[in-house]
Amino acid sequence: MNHTILQIDQLKTYFFTRNGVVKAVDGISLGLRKGECLCLVGESGCGKTATALSILRLVDSPPGRIVGGKIRYHGEDLLQSSGARLRQIRGNHIAMIFQDPQSSLNPVFTVGNQIMEQISLHLKLGRSQARDRALALMEQVGIPQAEERMKYYPHQFSGGMKQRAMIAAALSCDPEILIADEPTTALDTTIKAQILDIFRNLKKERDMSILFITHDLGTVAGIADRIIVMYGGRIAEAGSVFDIFDQPKHPYTWGLLNCLPSIPERQKKMTPIPGVIPSLIDPPEGCIFYPRCQWRMPVCQQERPGEFIISGEHVAACYLYA
Amino acid sequence: MSQKLLEVENLKKYYPVTAGLLSRHVADVKAVDGVSFFIAEGETLGLVGESGCGKSSLGRALLRLEEPTSGQVFYRGNDITSFNRKQLKELRKEAQMIFQDPQSSLDPRMTIGDAIGEALLIHSVGTEKERLERVEELLKRVGLEPGHAARYPHELSGGQKQRAGIARALAVNPKLIVADEPVSALDVSVQAQILNLITDLQREFSLAYLFIAHDLAVIGQVSSRIAVMYLGQIVELATRDDLFRQPLHPYTQALLSAVFLPDPHQRRDRIPLPGEVPSPIDPPRGCRFHTRCPRAMSVCRQQTPLLKDIDGNHLVACYLYDGADTA
């Protein structure tokens, strides 16, 4: 098994709003290993994006603040790092891709220019060298006629091409870790499949570690080595992709898997999870899934469940396994 | 089979492209380019396709929310493209729409109750007291509380807003609802609630739906028949089971093969589609899919295949199944 290069311990990221303190990330621990794809899965408001932004200390402050925990990258605590050191790590060691490639590209510069800018900034290369590298990267992520397309502006690119360009930019400094926040959510089915191929190749060919954030369990099944299911700012269940899909243990995971439409067979009637996603302002004392859980017990309301080991690295935060 | 509720014939919707100071008309975006199909009473026809294929334009042109460029739409045998204002208003009681983004389709300054009741008011249905009762009944039917009537859209969650959007569409007792990506903005646990509601309402009120979505699994959950659209045209139309078990058009095959199922054991050979969807301003000659089709033949580059019934209820527009006509 490969060694862990990024270790998060008891991370707490809160947002201090007028209505109260939103506990977006409330004690998350996870480790990302060399060359693996770890998926953070959950619905909106579960804290998956806040977790990712916390790693690179990109949480908007105010209102957000990392109030506790440790994030160690090769042993170095990123929460203690200076601004200069963080700038070195961002892009060079840990790069990030966002959901909407449209808003992450500057509309008034050509795509080639923007990729070259990253390269010259981080790698201190000259213009023509930066250009060659940008071109090679664009070809690598499957942008056809890359030489010509370098001169295009973002609006001349389709959604899929923009996301390829963003991946090329993220790869420009050969980072060890790639954090991808819903990178395929805005894309069409056939394009999504192409982009996921790129991620798979990055893992295989560059031994890159990928932290992949998504709400789509289909995507997860196609790309993840390990999965962390998040709910209400906490980890509900974690395990290998086969643990989670073949032997899910947490009632929330059951709910998520049951409420998916399937093909080719139709579900007779879908089984939605009753109730709504909880407010993270003043979350309940015990298990945060308690109000929607059909298997709840008195203890669940009293104390927040710890992580119970199911087998190996398969854990569930649920008293059913106490 | 039950009666045809809606029949569409060779419908086209072009958007003009203009240039220069005088807005000279230089070209057309052929969003919908000659589409024909029907929807039977009480059935759900799913319409699937990738972004830009014209599925939303079709849904809007169909109800004359936007004027079609040409073609005809028959509702219970009457051509609605020739309807005047008064007739159109009557049609709105029969045919309603649910939108993708419940946030932007509800007026932020109007309470949920007023938004639902507005349709009743416009069509002068009942007294004020009766209208209030009807709103309350509708709210309960879609799974909201009567108390929600006094709330504003921003006070509701995404799923609740979509329920309100459905209640508003139901208010006038329609027989046909065009639902344009009604669940794609929702979380999966909420999506399932809304899909169940949509199918329950269908049974209860014998509604017909045109259900537009890009997600094949979602479409498959609610539809009895499915039409696949590519670049402004329908390339295949079949019953749900036929389409999933035996897709005929190479585009449908590729689309299905690209779906990631929530199953890590699935090993399917994906059919790669080279390139991108061409521009609807200047679509390829012949079959519009030939530039990306792994099985394209020379005839595909010259002639446009027609949507033909090849097997009872399975329509496909592809020369692979049309040997006789290739000469």
Image: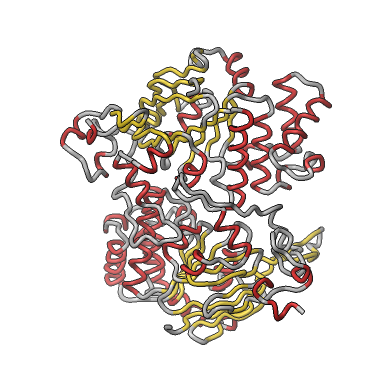
What count of labels does the image hold?
Answer: 0
Residue occupying image coordinates x 52% and y 72%? B238
Residue B113 vs residue B33: left or right?
left
Q: Residue A166 at what x, y percent from top left?
A: 65, 36
Question: Residue visible at 74% across and 77% down?
Answer: B326
In what quadrant of the picture does the C terminus of chain B appear?
A: bottom right
- View extreme (bottom): residue: B77
Q: Is residue B34 left or right of residue B257?
A: right
Q: Quadrant of residue A42?
A: top left
Q: Is residue A4 above or below residue A202?
A: above
- Image quadrant where residue A173 sits: top right
Residue at the image position 61 percent from the left and 73 percent from the top: B316
Residue A282 in view: no
- Vertical comparison of A48 with B248: above or below: above
Residue at far left of view: A298
Question: Who is closer to the viewer here, B17 or A12?
Answer: A12
Q: Position of residue B63 (x, y in %)?
A: 53, 73
Relative depth, front residue between A163 and B28: A163
Query: What percent of the width, then of the height, locates residue A132?
Result: 80, 30
